[in-house]
Image (cartoon, grey):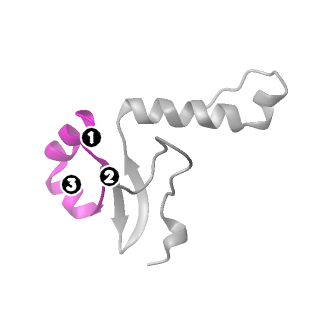
Amino acid sequence: MDQTLRPRAIGTGAIGPGPGSRTMNATTVRQESRGVVQRVYHGDHRVIVERSGIPVAAIVSVADLNQLLEIASYLSPDSRSGQTVSLR
Protein backbone atom coordinates (compact mmCIF):
# COMPACT_ATOMS: atom_id res chain seq x y z
CA MET A 1 0.00 0.00 0.00
CA ASP A 2 1.28 3.45 -0.87
CA GLN A 3 2.02 5.17 2.44
CA THR A 4 1.43 8.61 0.90
CA LEU A 5 -2.30 7.88 0.94
CA ARG A 6 -2.37 7.54 4.71
CA PRO A 7 -3.00 10.50 7.02
CA ARG A 8 0.19 11.70 8.69
CA ALA A 9 0.69 13.32 12.08
CA ILE A 10 1.54 17.01 12.00
CA GLY A 11 2.99 17.91 15.37
CA THR A 12 1.75 16.90 18.79
CA GLY A 13 -1.85 15.73 19.03
CA ALA A 14 -2.49 15.74 15.29
CA ILE A 15 -4.67 13.11 13.75
CA GLY A 16 -2.90 10.26 12.03
CA PRO A 17 -2.06 6.62 12.44
CA GLY A 18 -0.55 5.89 15.75
CA PRO A 19 -1.32 4.38 19.14
CA GLY A 20 -5.16 4.93 19.11
CA SER A 21 -5.57 4.54 15.38
CA ARG A 22 -6.91 1.46 13.73
CA THR A 23 -7.36 0.59 10.06
CA MET A 24 -10.47 -1.41 9.15
CA ASN A 25 -12.04 -2.43 5.87
CA ALA A 26 -15.47 -1.01 5.08
CA THR A 27 -17.25 -4.35 5.50
CA THR A 28 -15.86 -4.81 9.01
CA VAL A 29 -16.84 -1.24 9.93
CA ARG A 30 -20.41 -1.96 8.82
CA GLN A 31 -20.52 -5.24 10.75
CA GLU A 32 -19.05 -3.72 13.91
CA SER A 33 -20.47 -0.20 13.58
CA ARG A 34 -21.88 0.01 17.09
CA GLY A 35 -18.58 -0.99 18.71
CA VAL A 36 -16.58 1.25 16.37
CA VAL A 37 -18.69 4.29 17.24
CA GLN A 38 -18.47 3.53 20.96
CA ARG A 39 -14.67 3.24 20.87
CA VAL A 40 -14.33 6.47 18.87
CA TYR A 41 -16.82 8.26 21.14
CA HIS A 42 -14.92 7.26 24.27
CA GLY A 43 -11.67 8.47 22.71
CA ASP A 44 -10.12 5.02 22.50
CA HIS A 45 -9.70 4.94 18.70
CA ARG A 46 -9.57 6.78 15.43
CA VAL A 47 -10.55 4.53 12.54
CA ILE A 48 -9.25 4.71 8.98
CA VAL A 49 -11.73 2.98 6.67
CA GLU A 50 -10.32 1.19 3.63
CA ARG A 51 -11.90 -0.24 0.50
CA SER A 52 -9.72 -2.62 -1.48
CA GLY A 53 -6.76 -1.55 0.65
CA ILE A 54 -7.20 2.16 -0.16
CA PRO A 55 -8.01 4.61 2.67
CA VAL A 56 -11.34 6.27 1.78
CA ALA A 57 -12.61 7.76 5.05
CA ALA A 58 -11.85 8.28 8.70
CA ILE A 59 -14.05 8.04 11.76
CA VAL A 60 -12.92 10.44 14.47
CA SER A 61 -14.39 11.91 17.63
CA VAL A 62 -16.06 15.31 17.61
CA ALA A 63 -13.12 16.63 19.65
CA ASP A 64 -10.71 15.48 16.91
CA LEU A 65 -12.96 16.97 14.22
CA ASN A 66 -13.07 20.31 16.01
CA GLN A 67 -9.28 20.24 16.29
CA LEU A 68 -8.99 19.57 12.55
CA LEU A 69 -11.41 22.37 11.70
CA GLU A 70 -9.45 24.78 13.89
CA ILE A 71 -6.20 23.81 12.19
CA ALA A 72 -7.82 24.12 8.73
CA SER A 73 -9.16 27.58 9.51
CA TYR A 74 -5.73 28.66 10.74
CA LEU A 75 -4.06 27.36 7.58
CA SER A 76 -6.65 28.87 5.23
CA PRO A 77 -5.30 31.80 3.18
CA ASP A 78 -8.54 33.71 3.93
CA SER A 79 -8.01 33.49 7.69
CA ARG A 80 -4.54 34.96 7.41
CA SER A 81 -5.95 38.02 5.65
CA GLY A 82 -8.38 38.64 8.52
CA GLN A 83 -11.49 37.39 6.72
CA THR A 84 -13.96 34.98 8.30
CA VAL A 85 -13.78 31.48 6.87
CA SER A 86 -16.70 29.07 6.68
CA LEU A 87 -15.73 25.40 6.51
CA ARG A 88 -19.22 24.19 5.63
Going by the numbered disc 2, the residue's amino acid type is: Val
Q: Position of residue 7 (x, y in %)?
A: 49, 57
Whether residue 88 appears in this view of the structure is no
Q: Amino acid at mark 3?
A: Arg
Query: Where the C terminus falls, by quadrant?
Result: top right
Identify the residue at horizontal 39%, vertical 51% (top origin): 58
Q: In the rendered structure, which disc, 1 or 3, sits on the residue that comes first in sequence?
A: 3
**Sequence-first tag of 2 and 1:** 1
Q: Nearer the viewer, residue 86 or 70?
A: 70
- Label 2–label 1 contact, CB within 8 A: yes
Boundaries of the magenta span: 21-47
Determine the image quadrant of residue 80. Answer: top right
**Residue 40, numbered circle:** 1
Q: Mark 1 or 3, which is nearer the eye?
A: 1
Q: Position of residue 66 (x, y in %)?
A: 48, 29
**Depicted 61 relative to depicted 58: above or below:** above
State the image quarter where residue 54 is shown.
Answer: bottom left
